Image: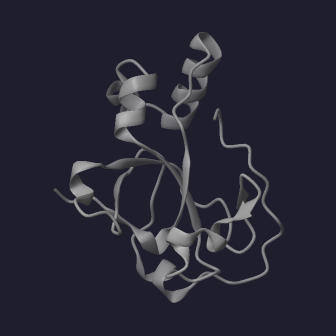
Amino acid sequence: MSRDTETTAPESDPPTQATLDTPYLTPGTQVIDKTEDAPSENPLRVLNPDKGRANNVTHNGTKICNYETNTDFPDNDTVVVATYESELDKAVNNWEEMLNEDFIEALNDFEDKWGVYPDTYYFPRSRLEKNTT
């Protein structure tokens, strides 16, 4: 999938307390999926830290809150769009160097030039945490 182009319905719910209590994420921030068995072995990079609420954002025709892997998280949690570092390794040469630039703009420029963009994944915010390892 190229760039983050999924649709979002208008916001109707305020952010959850879990979202408010967690550190703000920015594009390029390294995070881990807390539901994985060994999350630090499969880190992700944030592409969009606030896509909308999980009960309003759809991906492949399904609301994010309705995915089986997300049912333990609040329906109105903020949706974070991210990609695994392993996807970046496959799709984008020297992506680590882009972290010192506007990360999203650099990825979009790379796609414009080479026609390649990493696969993207949608997560409830409370499912992710900043990687501190």
Considering the image in quadrants, where does the N terminus appear? top right
x, y percentage for residue 95?
Answer: 38, 26
Q: Which of the 4 quarters of the picture holds residue 12?
A: bottom right
Q: Residue furthest bottom?
A: 17
Left or right for 99, reference 51: left
Taking the spot 50% from the left edge, 34% from the top edge, the residue there is 102
Q: Residue furthest front?
A: 68
56, above or below 4, in the image: below
31, above or below 104, in the image: below
Taking the spot 63% from the left edge, 73% from the top edge, the residue there is 65
Taking the spot 34% from the left edge, 20% from the top edge, the residue there is 94
Q: Residue furthest left?
A: 133
131, above or below 107, in the image: below
Q: How is the image coloured?
A: one colour
Q: Residue furthest right?
A: 10
27, above or below 118, in the image: below
Taking the spot 22% from the left edge, 55% from the top edge, the residue there is 40
Left or right for 39, reference 91: left
x, y percentage for residue 82?
Answer: 49, 49
Considering the image in quadrants, where does the C terminus appear? bottom left
Q: How many marks?
A: 0
Q: Is residue 17 or residue 63 the one in the foreground? A: 63
x, y percentage for residue 81?
Answer: 55, 53
Left or right for 102, reference 22: right
Q: Is residue 98 or residue 126 the one in the foreground? A: 126
Q: Is residue 63 or residue 44 the one in the foreground? A: 63
Q: Which of the 4 quarters of the picture holds residue 111?
A: top right
